[in-house]
Amino acid sequence: MANKSKALLLVLLACLSAWALAGAEAPAGLPEEYAAYEYVCESDQYILYCYKPYLSVTLQHKETGRMIGCVPVPGEIKNPSQKDAQTYSGLMIQIQQGTASTNTKYIDPMRSSHTIAYTDLEDGFAADIRFTEYQISLRVEVRLVDDELRVRIPHESIREGLLDQRTEEEILADALREEAEGSEESGSEESGEAAAADASANSVNIRSVILLPTFGATRQDEHEGYMLIPDGNGALVRFRQRAERGDPDFTNTYIYGPDAGFTTPPARTKLWGDYETLTDTYSLTLPVFGMARTDDGMGYIAVVESGADRCSVDVNASGAERLDYNRICASFLLREYYRQNKTKIGMVERDRTHHDLEVRYCLLSGEDANYVGMARRYREYLLDNGEVIQADTSYATRVDFLGLEQENFLFATRGVVMTTADDIREISEDLRSAGVSTLFSLYKGWQSGGLYSVPVKGFSADGALGGNGSLAALIAEEAAKGHRIDLYTDALRLNAAKTAFTYDVAGMVTKADMTEENTKPVYGKFYYLLPELSAENIGSLAESLKAAGIRSMAVGGINERLFSWSKKDTYHTRREALDLYAGALSGVRERGMGLSMEAPLGYQLRYVDTYLNAPLDTSEYFVFDDEVPFLSIVFRGVLPVYGNYVNFEANKTEFFLQMVETGTYPSFYITQESTSALIYTNSNDLYSTRYSSFRDTIIEYDRALRALAEVTGGSGIADHEILGDLRRVTYENGAVVLVNYGAEAAEIDGITVEPMSYAWKAGDEP
């Protein structure tokens, strides 16, 4: 027996020695602060634990013993505050009592009377929670699958028992009656809200649900690392204690942008009343967010798999909102608050959204726990789940053309011809003779009536540009020479000055028409089409183009706005619009046609084969610490990615270097005629487009970026490093690109990179 014990001890010592020699860290036991957590299940890489009273979950990495999850609960907390709930609870629900905008509160497992019934699942658990006072209940399912944590609330599990049973008309009538009878401030907005609140004091509606609000959160600067926000190309909020403890400037930002069905865009500040002086901030086009502890190699990229159309990314930098934690999470909106159009009385959507709320946390460890690892993992997720289809990423310079515009003339408008089909043929031939061997183009304003003659329902080219026959022949001839031309259509907008309409326009939930107004000289107002009509127009145009032998198209508008709407007193959700748009885009691809889109939204990616107008910077919110090429890394080598137009960039040198750094292809917006001809049209903000002015620049950019593309090939980006003013980008084929944004020369990898310049070395693979 003693010999057996001695043998076992020797084996154990040998294993530990081998572990140490391999440089790995022996797995640790559960840290003391997690002593109250219960074991749930495990995968090959992680162990899942839960603190059941507060629905707080955490994971332990088996190889290192390190933890990642909700902020550890310090045992039972007596008289917890909302700050405690925000920090330690795994679930928070915002409820609306009545209709007053201020009459909201959060309920959670720490502070609210409730019951929780846990059920074991094969790979996790389900928690059925009921808040007894408010008769609200739902089920939270948590699963650990390999190196992913999947959290879901099935929509059918959500129950609400104290709903306001009055109709919208009854609520308004009650509010106005109470206001007239008893308010000293008759007619005021506040008194109307108060009356409406009193009349429905017993009603309770769910406004929003936050899942795992502190998953991965870190306290102040205890760790090195950051949170990733998919704003623009990608923004980092680093772990540090903020000096200011006020509200952050980036908060509750909705994926796919704000809902225009409820919110009218604010008026833009204009110079001298006519010229816009501010650039719009970016919308979050991708349903993801991330967090990484770079000092100990733990992190994740989270994908909002269901409910993204009504989900915001909630970010808290340590110190803001009086919380000492860096946290980022998904907040799902179930009901929107809005003001009735005529009376301005506050209202809450009568019905909630009816889809699952689901987030998949793709866990990262070691050297992958950084923004590059996040991007590569998201790329893998998109490809594996068919959310994006591998496309031909061969290099081509993008040269878009403006065909026809309109200017006022006497009592009508007249066409302003900028670039005809024959002009495009001549320009393309000229560029090919100069070595620009492959081109990609959008043709905008090709339709009868010009650029702002929308909607477009079929293939009807303006005769001044050459008509259908000339344009179809051009597209076919150019395709044979390596030049793809996509006809562009804005599928969102309707120009009432060009198109008669009756019931084609989408109404806001407040009953007002959805419109865009501007101070342009010809067309000052556009309406949003009903989503079913947008979808119908896309389908009919695709069929018409295919019949003419045209095999690709470009769709815009629906990538800019996703909205709820009303039609004949019936409300429709953003999800319904999403489904209609997705069905139309799917129909384009099912017809065997190519599809390009400008900054497509996440759900549109599976239908496109060309990504246009990719941002190379961010919205530059104050809370952002760094800009990183997250989006570029995701799509490089999967889709051909084009940037914004070079014409309109103030600092062309820096913009060129950003394209080099990110592997982005260049874009130009060109006209044959002088740009001055546009001065009295709606395109009067285009200040430099004439081909003769940009010919040499197009050739120069093509020569440089085509040579770089030959070195990097169709490879994805394997690594990206920020080294002061220097960027080192490593491709999967081994190629390395070095970009120096500094004012002095830099030497790295035996290569000298001049200031505001770049260099590369080829990889080992062919």
Image (tube, grey):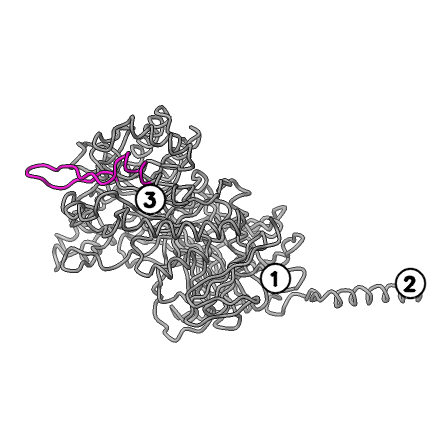
For the record, the magenta segment spans: 403-427
Q: Are marks 3 and 1 in contact (CB under 8 Å)?
A: no
| Disc 3 target residue | 562
| Disc 1 target residue | 366
- Residue 760 lies, in percent from the top left, at 52, 59
Q: For the residue marked with disc 1, what is the amino acid? A: Gly
Residue 508: quadrant of the picture: top left
- Residue 623 lies, in percent from the top left, at 38, 66
The reply, left or right, for residue 27 in relation to residue 651 is right
Residue at the image position 36 percent from the left and 35 percent from the top: 553
Count the marks: how many? 3
Residue 406: quadrant of the picture: top left
Q: For the residue marked with disc 3, what is the amino acid? A: Leu
Q: Are marks 2 and 1 in contact (CB under 8 Å)?
A: no
Observer-nearest residue: 717 or 754?
Answer: 754
Observer-nearest residue: 76 or 25?
Answer: 25
Q: Are marks 2 and 3 in contact (CB under 8 Å)?
A: no
The reply, left or right, for residue 247 in relation to residue 419 is right
- Which of the two discs, 3 and 1, labels the residue nearer the N terminus? 1
| Disc 2 target residue | 4
Q: For the residue marked with disc 2, what is the amino acid? A: Lys
The answer to whether residue 321 is seen in the rendering is: yes
Outermost residue to the left: 410
Measure how far apart labels 3 and 1 are at the Cα level.
Answer: 38 Å
- Residue 307 lies, in percent from the top left, at 43, 46
- Which of the two discs, 2 and 1, labels the residue nearer the N terminus? 2
Query: Magenta includes 595?
Result: no
Give the number of the mark in front: 2 or 3: 3
> SS of the residue at dot 2?
helix
The reply, left or right, for residue 352 in relation to residue 125 is left
